[in-house]
Image (cartoon, helix red, strand yellow):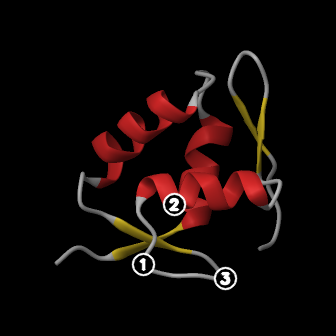
Amino acid sequence: MSQSIHGHQVIDSVSNSEILFTTSTLKIAVAEQFGDDSLFHTCMDSNLTAEDLINFLVSKGKFIETEAGFIAVTGSC
């Protein structure tokens, strides 16, 4: 069983990367960094897959999609 990873770790990874990620490339990067079967949590939700987390972060304005890729907005939950 994998440990739950806070969504801020993914936000920080995107913020600190020189790569602009699309949804597809971010899912691959998250799997490489945290493992294929990792689950994630936020201040508001838990047991999220990588895809669920990405969709959640987009819906909350933490990831803003541009033509080039995601821009991460850091801050509290």
In x, y percent, where is residue 57?
68, 57
Instruction: Report the amino acid beneath label 1.
Output: Asn
Outermost residue on the left side: it is 1
Q: CA distance from mark 2 to mark 3?
A: 14 Å
Of helix, strand and loop, which one carries label 1?
loop
- State which quarter of the image contains the N terminus: bottom left
Residue at 60% in and 76% down: 42
Disc 2 designates what residue? Answer: 52
Q: CA distance from mark 1 to mark 3?
A: 12 Å
Of helix, strand and loop, which one carries label 2?
helix
Q: Which label sits in the foreground, 2 or 3?
A: 2
Residue at 59% in and 82% down: 45
Q: Identify whether 19 is placed above or below 45.
A: above
User: Could you tell which of marks 2 and 3 lies nearer the N-terminus?
Assistant: 3
Residue at 55% in and 35% down: 23
- Tell me the tag on residue 43: 3
Instruction: Report the amino acid beneath label 2.
Output: Asp
Of helix, strand and loop, which one carries label 3?
loop
- Tell me the tag on residue 47: 1
In x, y percent, where is residue 35?
25, 53
Depth check, front residue: 20 or 51: 51
Which quarter of the figure has residue 7? bottom right
In x, y percent, where is residue 61?
83, 54
User: Could you tell which of marks 1 and 2 lies nearer the N-terminus?
Assistant: 1
